[in-house]
Amino acid sequence: MTGVLGKWWFLSLLICSMLLLSPTVTSYPAESDKGRKKVVHVLEDEFGAVIVQTAPGKVVTHRGGTITLPCRFHHEPENVDPSRIRIKWTKVSDEFQFQDVFVALGRQQRVFGPYRGRVELERAGPGDASVIIHNVTLQDYGRYECEVTNDMEDDTGFVNLDLEGVVFPYYPRLGRYRLNYHEAEEACKHQDAILASHSQLHKAWKDGLDWCNAGWLEDGSVQYPVAHPRDQCGRKDTPGVRNYGYRHKEDERYDAFCFTSKLNGQVYFLKRFKKVNYTEAVKACVREGAVMAKVGQLYAAWKFQLLDRCDAGWVEDGSVRYPIVNPRARCGGPDPGVRNLGFPEKKFRLYGVYCFRKDLVNSETEATQALVQSSSVFTTSTQSI
């Protein structure tokens, strides 16, 4: 009997020791922001806790802009050596793939891949882990993780970076439903865009986008927005975003929904006394010190420059289009948008041309950043920070 009691006493002591030594995770509600509460996750152990706070909702900018991804932290207790604090920013995709952005340990810092020359710590005071992204690109859109570590303690917060922009449907000269996921991704990229996210397509639908052909989105799903229900577009009495779910990325073929943002340049219709064929259109833009506009650039000009022309013109992919901000008679219908006349034979001299010219200032900035990236030398290895 004494042996049994001894075993129970030893087991109870072991369990109590494990409970005392194991870290506990506690969630503390923070200040509300427009009625929404953000939760700060805290990892506590016998050494204390590190607490990370990030902004609820989204931070919004546009391509070419500068934006701060806010992240602050503090320790409990505060007796922490700043040189032992590690700050790491990572971009997280919907498929839980991680892309390193920035890491710092004390005075040592490293910026990764396409973020080199564009990302820096804000340094607004003690406890500030915010980073500033300069010359924001379309690919910067998405979700970011801010992780702060101090020896045994760490915590993370998330920031969503959104871009002002426009969603547009796209299909190539070959026709509709010809693109698998990877081809759709390349098609958008070639038109100065990226595959749209579900939230971007949903916002475009709320703004009136109506398209009855299904297209790929960046998460691998296939959807399409219907603002004006009709028989051939699914449920005829219900507007909404129709969703086919996640499809096989290699074998199945659809159109694409692309997303683009503000331009680092200007799109314009080249005024000429005579119409040109496609080859002549290319040369005409080059003589202007420009290039033929891509489809995404024409949409961005329509959205942000308020480009409004009732003149059909060639664009880079061989299609003929024109942008209408203020609908009027004989300009293609009652709604604003970019009209698409399809892909005529390139030999026809029936149209004008839309050209794109980069901003000189932005071109010089991009060249400087490319030089910084190519000449960057990091003496500290990734493992050490």
Image: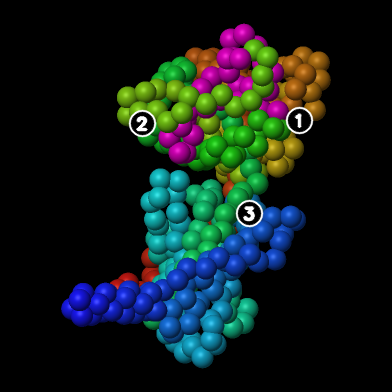
Q: Which mark is residue 68?
A: none
Along the viewing direction, whichever of 11 and 375 lies nearer the viewer: 11
Q: Earlier in the sequence, mark 1 or mark 2?
A: 2
- Between the residue at mark 3 and the residue at mark 2, the CA separation in whole angstroms equals 29 Å
What residue appears at the point 66 percent right and 27 percent down from the top-left corner?
A: 209
Q: Are marks 3 and 2 in contact (CB under 8 Å)?
A: no
Q: Is residue 291 left or right of residue 377?
A: right
Along the viewing direction, whichever of 78 and 247 lies nearer the viewer: 78
What residue appears at the point 60 percent right and 50 percent down from the top-left corner?
A: 162
What residue sits right under mark 1 in the picture?
A: 325
Q: Earlier in the sequence, mark 3 or mark 2?
A: 3
Residue 101 can be seen, yes or no: yes
Q: Is residue 181 magenta?
A: no
What is the crowding at mark 1: few (fewer than 14 residues within 10 Å), some, or many (at least 20)?
some
What residue sits right under mark 3 in the picture?
A: 58
Q: Position of residue 192 (x, y in %)?
A: 52, 40
Q: Residue type at mark 2: give it.
A: Lys
- Between the residue at mark 1 and the residue at mark 2, the CA separation in whole angstroms equals 36 Å
Image quadrant containing the N terminus = bottom left
Q: Position of residue 260 (x, y in %)?
A: 58, 41
Residue 14 higher or lower than 373, as above or below:
below
The magenta segment = 208-235
Disc 1 element: loop
Disc 2 element: loop
Q: Which mark is residue 249?
A: 2
Q: Position of residue 282 (x, y in %)?
A: 52, 31
Q: Residue type at mark 3: give it.
A: Lys
Magenta span: predominant SS is loop
Q: Residue type at mark 1: give it.
A: Val
